[in-house]
Image (cartoon, rainbow, N blue to C red):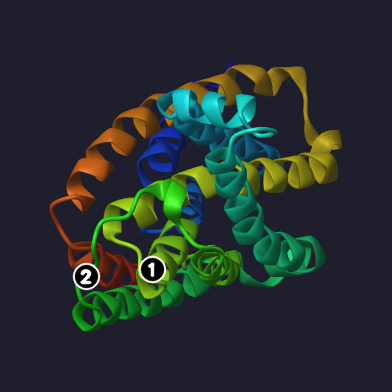
Amino acid sequence: MDFYLLWAAFLLGIIEGVTEFLPVSSTGHLIIGAELLGFTDPSSKVFEIFIQLGAIFAVVVEYRKKILVTFIGIQTDKVAQVFTKNLIIAFIPAAILGFFFHSLIKLHLFNPIVVGIALIVGGVLMIIIEKKLPNRPKVDVDKISKKQALIVGVAQCFSLIPGISRAASTIMGGLIGGLDRKTATEFSFFLAIPIIFAASIFDLSSNIDILSKGDIPIFLVGFMTAFLSSYFIIKIFIWFVSNNTFVAFGWYRIIIGCLTIYYFL
């Protein structure tokens, strides 16, 4: 067994878990991390799928009560029905674009330079949005309107570009749509479940022939570290956004983007 690959899987699992739900682009960080660690063989594509599933499983565990109540009440409870409809509305735009352009985007845009540029652009926009938009009154995630859900869904389309960040695009879309930071963040968490599952199934079906038994320990290490780190980050991040703005994340993105371009150019 290659212990270096296990170590790389451990580090990349932590990177995925820490960055998946922060507005800093987990995909961008994984591309940079994989390049620096030399973890770029064909099996790395499947590995990324597994660690993303580990991160999303953390959301399922953290919000299991809400998910279960929604699932049970989907046929009779109006709150559950509205919440589900909003998730579907927000899910559709990126799902359609991803279905038609995902392979093309991966082929041409999944490189460190694109990630660096996207990190900088996203960071600048994040700071501008935070500075320009007023504080919003707190709204429960169940009371998001269809229009707000659609705005979040359209914003999520930009996250198909590596480095933009699914979390950043959906949260900023929520703020633009009139949601407060905590509600926008929680809706982004819930929206991550269908979009990442769908993307994972699509990717897995395209790369199933790459899988081998020898990769299982590496995949398990990455999955578990991504799950555990995501689980703790979700709790910390919700507390943070309840008391702070996203400006610090904007500056972080700009700095990391500049360093990435300088290093790989």
Q: Position of residue 191 (x, y in %)?
A: 54, 49
Q: Callout 1 environment at 10 Å: few (<14), some (14 to 19), or many (20+)?
A: many
Q: Earlier in the sequence, mark 1 or mark 2?
A: 1
Residue 136 drawn at (x, y percent):
24, 67
Judge from the rendering whether residue 45 lies leftward or rightward of residue 68; answer left or right: right
SS class, disc 1? helix
Residue 251 image position (x, y, % from top left):
21, 70
195 shown above or below 247: above
Percent x, y of residue 33: 44, 49
107 horizontally vs 236: left or right = right
Q: Residues within 10 Å of mark 2 (few under 14, many from 20)?
A: some
Residue 255 drawn above or below residue 58: below
Q: CA distance from mark 1 to mark 2?
A: 15 Å
Q: Is residue 5 visible?
A: no
Residue under label 1, please give it.
172
Which quadrant: the N terminus? top right
Q: With 73 as the anchor, is 61 left or right in this view? A: left
Q: Secondary structure at mark 2?
A: helix
Q: Residue furthest left?
A: 243
Relative height, residue 225 to residue 163 (above, below): above
The answer to whether residue 203 is seen in the rendering is yes
Q: Residue at x 75, y 40 (%)?
A: 201
The image quadrant where one finds the C terminus is bottom left
Q: Nearer the viewer, residue 53 or 179?
A: 179
Q: Amino acid at mark 2?
A: Trp
Q: Which residue is mark 2?
A: 251
